[in-house]
Image (spheres, rainbow, N blue to C red):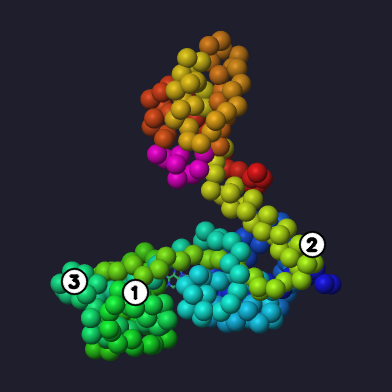
Amino acid sequence: MENVLRLAVQKSGRLSDDSLKLIRECGISFTQAVGKLKSEAYNFPLEFLFLRDDDIPQYVAEGIADIGIVGENVLLETGENVQLVEKLGFSKCRLAIAVPRDFGYESVEDLQEMSIATSYPRILQSFLDKHQIQAHIHEISGSVEIAPSIGLANAICDIVSSGSTLMSNGLKEVELVFKSEAILIAHPQLSEAKTQTLNQLQFRIQSVNRANNNKYILMNVPNESIPKIIDILPGMKSPTVVPLAMSGWSSLHSVVQEDEFWKIIEQLRQAGAQGILVVPIEKMIL
Ligand code: PRT
Ligand code: ZN
């Protein structure tokens, strides 16, 4: 079928579970047989190719896969010509430079003439060029964090998430090079039929991600406090206000972003809101 999109996802690793979870949350059903390289969806024009993450940008650039889910760090490092369709909000991490904890690091100038071990030589080189630093890049494919302790390099440039790997190897983070998250990429010249399927998929992904980032909130409010509460609720111009059986009180319904919710909860209580309920949203269509 000419409208079937072939999606490249990581076979097994940090991106795999969240990538497949997102596809399932989009209402797309499939089975993944152990050890199999390919699979197809039952109820959406989508096929899967399970690959190593490093190969995904090239497969998509060459059109062997139409779309792919990969870390932005991997795309940038490979430099392949693909289209960035959507940031997906999971597998967030950063590429950072770290030095031994007792190194008296003051500024990026301290990297001058250093030897830096990394699996991301291209991204590191462009960071060094931007800051006019001459350093020696030592490319290694794994266990970058042990390079300083075995005398292979003075510093490293590696992916950091919680920071505990750096800490347990006696290193400290000194420069942020690049912030990354999982992204959906596409071949730059998809056919009309495949572009339509991609638009449908992207619409579903956006609805799922929006829902995951927002909560439905309900609270009981004395009528005289309604204007104050509406002021506190970010971005909502007209929340739903429903009268309660008890006179002088209303139930107020609104949608708030989860990270904002924790900032405003205390203000809502102080303004007189009671019985606050926070409910997950399954899909959110704008
Ligand atoms: O086998 P394959 O080649 O497919 O997988 P891989 O081993 O190359 O990649 P994988 O599965 O480890 O990571 C896939 C993607 O997840 C990366 O390209 C990043 O976009 C993203 N990601 C998110 C991470 C991390 N978080 C992460 N913490 N990738 C790697 N790490 C490693 C990092 O290299 C370091 O060793 O975890 C360690 C640091 O973690 P903290 O939490 O101790 O700071
Ligand atoms: Zn890899």
Please state, as top left, top right, bottom left or bottom right, where the N terminus lies in the image: bottom right
Q: Nearer the viewer, mark 2 or mark 1?
A: 1
Q: Position of residue 158 (x, y in %)?
A: 37, 75
Q: Which residue is mark 3?
A: 105
Give me the residue at 41% from left, 23% from top.
271
Q: Which residue is mark 2?
A: 43
Q: CA distance from mark 2 to mark 1?
A: 48 Å
The picture quadrant where one finds residue 232 is: top left
Please state, as top left, top right, bottom left or bottom right, where the C terminus lies in the image: top right
The answer to which of marks 2 and 1 sits earlier in the sequence is: 2
Q: In screen coordinates, is 221 left or right of 240? A: left
Q: In screen coordinates, is 240 left or right of 91? A: right
User: Mark 1: few, some, or many residues within 10 Å (few <14, many ≥20)?
Assistant: few
Q: Position of residue 139 (x, y in %)?
A: 38, 87
Q: Which residues are magenta?
A: 256-263
Q: Which residue is mark 1?
A: 130
Q: Nearer the viewer, mark 3 or mark 1?
A: 1
- Contact, mark 2 vs mark 3 (Cβ under 8 Å): no
Give me the residue at 59% from left, 17% from top.
244
Q: Nearer the viewer, residue 273 or 81?
A: 81
Residue 260 is inside the magenta segment = yes
